[in-house]
Image (tube, rainbow, N blue to C red):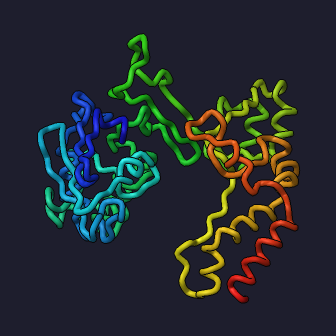
């Protein structure tokens, strides 16, 4: 979403959000992006109970769905009943369902009963193997992976699905209308085509890597495969690069603070001493060596060095392996709760 919008103005009370779409922005089929794409999403997708039976809490406040105000062809305003200051953060997350509120309306309208009639919309759905029109629209146009299944779907991404895609090969081709350029004025992306080979398991992926069949791979590789990948670098003609990530921990335990079914258990979960004890009972050094082969570093799940607000005390807080101290904290908790 930050790519799509030129600006966002938040009212002092956190209830109103005014967005400006970049003028000149186009879908991958060359059609301009305007507030009609937002209006269509709001009125014909979000508020349509067939296709959206449950509206995301991110788009509600005070028990009500936000109101949409179209200012002009490129400006619109979202107005909430109560402050919703978490919205800017939520819409930057691609995995947050229901908050991608700019859709290719010119394309989706041809499948929507409001624009083509219920009979035709149903006919199109059934011809494509769906029982209802809304199932077809959701699968082919609105799901997070729709663009990887439907080559006709207009997108705003650097690449779009190619018709060369098969059951064993996923091909992405350059979006000719992608709006970004480099400092020298060259349109991005540089790469015209990306080919993903679809394999049955991670072992097949590793085999392709060590035999030099993979140009670049970051996902679906396990630390358990590291030694094999390192040993075959020269033979396979590739490099293993250790990329520093902006996260403080690979695994984090989250205890439910809203649990209510058992009063005693709820009190335990909400007492900070319980969480401190659990942290002290984890042997990070052992996990570091046995699971991660000495890569990374044992630490607490806090901000990493070099990041704003980083605090070295947070990094080490209750991160040492100290079962004795953990037991003392649990004993204190036991006395308090009279368990």
Is 15 left, or right, of 152 in this rendering?
A: left
User: Where is residue 63 drawn, in percent x and y?
Assistant: 27, 71
| Residue 128 vertical placement versus 169 (above, below) | below
**Quarter-of-image position of residue 214:** top right
Residue at 29% from the left image edge and 64% from the top image edge: 61
| Residue 251 vertical placement versus 260 (above, below) | above
Is 74 left, or right, of 185 in this rendering?
A: left
User: Where is residue 249 drawn, in percent x and y?
Assistant: 68, 49
- The C terminus is located in which quarter? bottom right
Q: How many marks?
A: 0
| Residue 137 vertical placement versus 289 (above, below) | below
Q: Between 86 and 210, which is closer to the camera in this rendering?
A: 86
Residue at 62% from the left image edge and 69% from the top image edge: 255
User: Where is residue 189 drawn, in percent x and y?
Assistant: 45, 24
Residue at 51% from the left image edge and 37% from the top image edge: 171
Residue at 77% from the left image edge and 54% from the top image edge: 319
User: Where is residue 55 drawn, in percent x and y?
Assistant: 32, 66
Q: Between 296 and 46, which is closer to the camera in this rendering?
A: 296
Is 336 left, or right, of 33 in this rendering?
A: right
Q: Between 114 and 239, which is closer to the camera in this rendering?
A: 239
- The N terminus is located in which quarter? top left
Residue 153 visible: yes
Residue 110 visible: no
């Amino acid at each position: 979403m930050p790519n799509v919008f030129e600006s966002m103005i938040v009212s002092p009370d956190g209830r109103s959000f005014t967005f400006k779409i970049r003028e000149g922005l186009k879908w991958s089929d060359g059609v301009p992006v305007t507030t009609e794409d937002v209006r269509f999403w709001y009125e014909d997708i979000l508020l349509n109970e067939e296709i959206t039976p449950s509206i995301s809490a991110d788009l509600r406040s005070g028990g009500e769905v936000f109101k949409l105000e179209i200012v002009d062809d490129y400006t619109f305003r979202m107005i909430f009943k109560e402050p919703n200051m978490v919205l800017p953060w939520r819409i930057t997350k691609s995995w947050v369902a229901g908050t991608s509120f700019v859709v290719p309306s010119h394309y989706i309208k041809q499948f929507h009963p409001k624009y083509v009639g219920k009979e035709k919309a149903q006919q199109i759905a059934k011809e494509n193997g769906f029982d209802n029109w809304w199932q077809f629209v959701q699968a082919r146009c609105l799901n997070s992976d729709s663009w990887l299944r439907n080559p006709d779907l207009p997108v705003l991404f650097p690449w779009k699905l190619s018709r060369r895609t098969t059951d064993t090969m996923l091909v992405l081709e350059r979006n000719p209308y992608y709006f970004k350029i480099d400092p020298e004025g060259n349109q991005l992306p540089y790469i015209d085509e990306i080919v993903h080979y679809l394999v049955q398991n991670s072992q097949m992926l590793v085999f392709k890597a060590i035999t030099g069949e993979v140009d670049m791979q970051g996902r679906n590789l396990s630390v358990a495969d590291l030694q094999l990948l390192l040993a075959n670098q020269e033979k396979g003609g590739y490099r293993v690069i250790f990329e520093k990530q902006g996260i403080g921990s690979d695994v984090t335990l989250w205890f439910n603070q809203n649990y209510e079914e058992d009063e005693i258990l709820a009190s335990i979960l909400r007492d900070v001493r319980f969480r401190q004890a659990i942290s002290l009972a984890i042997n990070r050094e052992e996990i570091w060596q046995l699971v991660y082969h000495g890569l990374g570093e044992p630490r607490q799940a806090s901000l990493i060095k070099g990041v704003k607000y980083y605090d070295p005390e947070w990094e080490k807080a209750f991160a040492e392996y100290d079962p004795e101290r953990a037991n003392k904290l649990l004993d204190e908790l036991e006395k308090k709760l009279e368990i």
